[in-house]
Image (cartoon, rainbow, N blue to C red):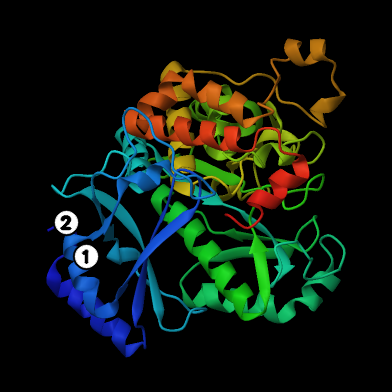
Amino acid sequence: MFGDGPERAEELAARLRRDGVHGVVLSYVDTAGVTRIKTVPVARLPRAARWGVGMSPVFDLFGTDDSITATQLQGGPDGDLRLVPDLDRLTTLAAQPGWAWAPVDRYTQAGEVWPGCQRSFTRAMAGRAAAAGLSFTMAIEVEWALGRAGTDAFVPACTGPAYGAIRLVELSDYARDLLAALDAQGVEVDQLHPEYADAQFELSVAARDPVGAADDSALVRQTIRAVAHRHGLRPSFAPAVLAGRVGNGGHVHLSATREGRNVFTGGPGPFGLTAEAEALAAGILDLLPAVLAVGAPSVASYLRLVPSHWAGVFACWGHETREAALRLITGNAGAEDAAANLEVKCVDLAASPYLLLGVLIAAALDGRRRELRLPAPVTGDPVRFTEQELAAGGIRRLPTSLDEATDALAAAAPLREALGELTTDAVLAVRRAEALRLRGASDEEVAAALRWVY
């Protein structure tokens, strides 16, 4: 037996039947950032919870085009894993009548956690933080562009201006149904608003524990897709929907508490940072080039990561500075303890949320271990500096290609250790295969190839 006891699973299955649910989506995200699923009828949920559902480990080596790479460690047709649903996150899908959803953990047939299980990796990194007396809370912003269904080209679903009320009026029914579905599913939404790019929207959810935050990101996107489909629309979460235009980010917000106190405020450091928070932020900043191999894992990510687009392409930090890769948010006066957090701006939704949040914790803890300190903060757009001024300020341009980011991860011992041999091997192999597949493609061809994948 892998998961929950039979009595609880039977009770939940009975509840689902009363709610008119017939099938359960068992969901995880692969190395390439693609959500993969299996489904079971409600009657089979207790068995799935006890014994798991079979799935080949080869999906760790899948690319965005469903091609399969291989390494000396893994790949090929051998082996089997068990997908075990987390019944604590079992959710009736409001926008998909008759269906429920649950994220899974992956186990070997012997009942051991699969070393390549991303959800277990996030849990393990949160456990490392807890062992050091820290509790992380995190959230992922979701940006997407809405196109008209029925075409692989991107035809914007609305014409109103960026951040404009007109855009919301044009898609008022869609936005209402999305909020209603998320509310029915227990997802706490902070904001929903039109964004900058054509027919682009952004949704922010409340911060929670790292595994829960990654689950929320997957569930929110599942819901956005389902509501869009019911309205004849097609959402793109790709980093670059159209070449040469502003793309979709997946900014991560994170904070940490020690004994219930937010360490990102109330300290003697810059803007109220404690020494511990400064070390956590400095660890992320130091390893950002390698983090991009996880957090900006698509060839299309580097069409988005261009200067002066608020994408955070320089490895620097600043207080409320939206061109810095790390933006320190302190919140309104008097609310700092609840609001102070660090925003990582250079990542996008091609990333597996589980890998990304786990890697950010690992980088932060490495900074704490080394007692790192932040360089001077930046203000304004770093693009105004000369190369000599950037170097003098310790400011680096982040990788400009997937190849460069992959090489940075290959050289980053703290992240390789945290990910483990199997997951590191899979990430490096899939990134190199993706880069090779699209090498020589034009920006327009890259955007078109990845527009509807994530």
Looking at the figure, which quarter contains the C terminus? bottom right
* Left or right: where 315 falls relative to 256: right
Q: Can you say whether 280 is above or below 393 in the image?
A: below
Q: Residue at x 43, y 31 (%)?
A: 362
Q: Nearer the viewer, residue 242 or 388?
A: 242
Q: Residue at x 80, y 55 (%)?
A: 196
Can you see residue 127? yes
Give x and y (percent) for residue 255: 51, 42
Q: Can you say whether 2 is above or below 442 in the image?
A: below
Q: Which mark is residue 49?
A: 1
Per the image, the residue denoted by label 2 is 2
Q: Residue at x 73, y 15 (%)?
A: 393
Q: Residue at x 58, y 32 (%)?
A: 436
Q: Can you say whether 334 is above or below 92 in the image?
A: above
Spatial separation of the CA atoms under disc 1 and disc 2? 7 Å
Q: Nearer the viewer, residue 390 or 330?
A: 390
- Please identify the quarter of the rendering in which residue 114 is found: top left
Q: Nearer the viewer, residue 360 or 339?
A: 360
- Please identify the quarter of the rendering in which residue 133 is found: top left
* Left or right: where 150 falls relative to 96: right
